[in-house]
Image (spheres, rainbow, N blue to C red):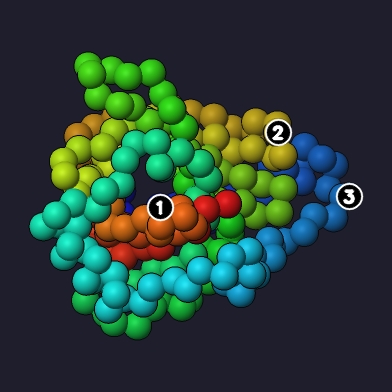
Amino acid sequence: MNIYKFLFIDVALVIAAIPILLLLRGGNKKYPLLTSSNKEKLLRKTSVKLPDKEKLIELEKLAKNQGSGIKFDSLIGDWNFISVWKKDIDEEDLVFSALLRIFAAKIKFQKNLPTEYLPKLSVIASIQLGVLTIEFSGSGYLKGKQPLLIFYFKQIKLKSSSKILLKRSLEEQKDKESIFSLIALEENGEWLSARGRGGALVIWMKD
């Protein structure tokens, strides 16, 4: 799934769910509209300097030739989307990066039971709008020297806090797999970079 399609599909689902939530809650309670999660706030958590696109390209070439050294266990945890660069554009996509942070977009990796001798990951991608959360959940694995992170979303949930409002299964198809070519992991695990299937460069920060 292209990362841009992922966000806009989620936003549409959230907007569509707001009337449902208000109906369930009686329509009288006020909710915060947006999450305060700008780049500066996220960066205050660490003194580590994030790489620019030029540096990411260098690291990507190194990963393709020698491997990134990123292992299964080093991915485990919650990762916040922090910056995105579109394919063939040098400047960071400030609008889209800001949207990812405003909607608290993140991806979570957990250990899953191994299947056919491949180390399996449980993958949960989510965005948040006030008390509403959209979650895509599935499983994946690492492949190759770089490596590639390959995963499928199997289920989507719309939640209000811990309450599930909507849930449905997603059909698992080969052409709907999500692929991130992992580029580099900061020495202390503060940030992780990758290139998406659609060509966008992404940086996550460890939550």
Q: How many marks?
A: 3
Q: As drawn, is 17 to the left or to the right of 50? A: right
Q: In the displayed image of the protein, which residue is found farthest to the left?
A: 65
Q: Is residue 192 visible?
A: yes
Residue in view at x 45 percent, y 38 percent: 76
Residue in view at x 72 percent, y 39 percent: 161
Occupied quadrant, residue 202: bottom left
The residue wearing badge 1 is: 6
* Residue 154: percent from left, percent from top: 39, 30
Residue type, label 1? Phe
Residue in view at x 87 percent, y 50 percent: 29
Residue 175 drawn above or below residue 127: above
Circle 2 SS class: loop
Residue type, label 2? Ser
Q: In the displayed image of the protein, which residue is found farthest to the right?
A: 28
Residue type, label 3? Asn
Q: As drawn, is 30 to the left or to the right of 153? A: right
Q: Nearer the viewer, mark 1 or mark 3?
A: 1
The residue wearing badge 2 is: 162
The residue wearing badge 3 is: 28
Gap between marks 3 and 2 measured at Cα: 20 Å
